[in-house]
Image (cartoon, rainbow, N blue to C red):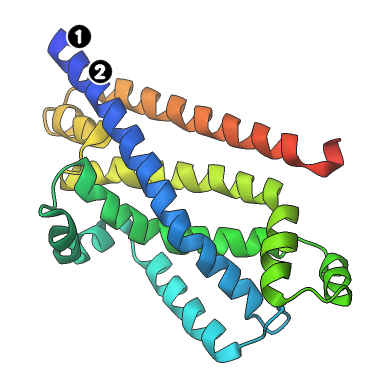
Amino acid sequence: MISPELWGLIGQGILETLYMVILSTVGSYVIGLPLGLLLVATDKDGVRPMRALNAVVGVIVNILRSIPFLILAVLVMPVTRAIIGTTIGSTATVVPLIIAAAPYVARMVESSIKEVGFGVIEAAQSMGASPWQIVTKVLVPEAKPSLLVGAAISIVTILGYSAMAGFIGGGGLGTIAQNYGYNRNQTPPMIVTVVLLVIIVQIFQTIGLRLAKKLDKRNR
């Protein structure tokens, strides 16, 4: 059985998890969205080909994506401590979450933008649009449905990272699962936290997919 005190901790864990996921998603898109657009624009078939810059950014993104989250979180602890003042807690966990998710978001954005038909780009170029205008006023609006689907997938990935952060004192439902489910070998807290994480995932996915469907011109 789960005690009333533990239910209170679970409620706090839900709020901490949502706090980490939402803040990290915003932060990762602040970094990842421009990176993804840069990768598309500077590609050899992009609106402003710059192979050297594209290669450098691509390598950095791939390297960061290749590092497992828990290892990355440990590696960036000095950065986290310098920014937050501590490496423990939900706020401190946001730093490695953003660093881990931003490259993933960049690739998701790149994939979504590249789904836009080349004919649309040619039409914009024929009307004298600059590379910046093509990216911001043509590519991004046309790719909105795909970008929203990518955002839903990214949130699910960040949520998974936040749960793993519980093993290094990251807070949220992951820490509850670690402290009460794993360390104390108690099955009920583990099951409850897993069920809650699944519910949160389904909520975010449903919202993202419905928004994407609503914005998709093919459904109008």
Picture residue at 71% right of the left edge, 65% below the top: 114
Where is 84 relative to 127, above or below?
above
Picture residue at 78% right of the left edge, 73% below the top: 129
Q: Which mark is residue 188?
A: 2
Position of 34 compared to 138: left or right? left
Q: Is residue 115 visible?
A: no
Q: Position of residue 215 (x, y in %)?
A: 74, 40
Position of 144 compared to 125: left or right? left
- Mark 2 surroundings: few (<14), some (14-19) or many (≥20) residues within 10 A: some
Where is 216 relative to 47, above or below?
above
Position of 135 compared to 9: left or right? right
Where is 195 relative to 136, above or below?
above
Residue 170, picture quadrant: top left
Q: Position of residue 64 (x, y in %)?
A: 38, 69
Position of 177 compared to 112: left or right? left
**Quadrant, the N terminus:** top left
Q: Position of residue 203 (x, y in %)?
A: 51, 27
Q: Is residue 168 visible?
A: yes
* Mark count: 2
Q: Which mark is residue 1?
A: 1
Q: Determine the secondary structure under disc 1.
A: loop
Q: Determine the secondary structure under disc 2.
A: helix
| Residue type marked 2 | Pro
Q: Nearer the viewer, residue 175 or 82?
A: 82
- Are the two marked residues, 2 and 1, in contact with CB atoms closer than 8 angstroms? yes
| Residue type marked 1 | Met
Q: Which mark is residue 200?
A: none
Q: CA distance from mark 2 to mark 1?
A: 7 Å
Where is 73 relative to 201, above or below?
below
Picture residue at 66% right of the left edge, 85% below the top: 49
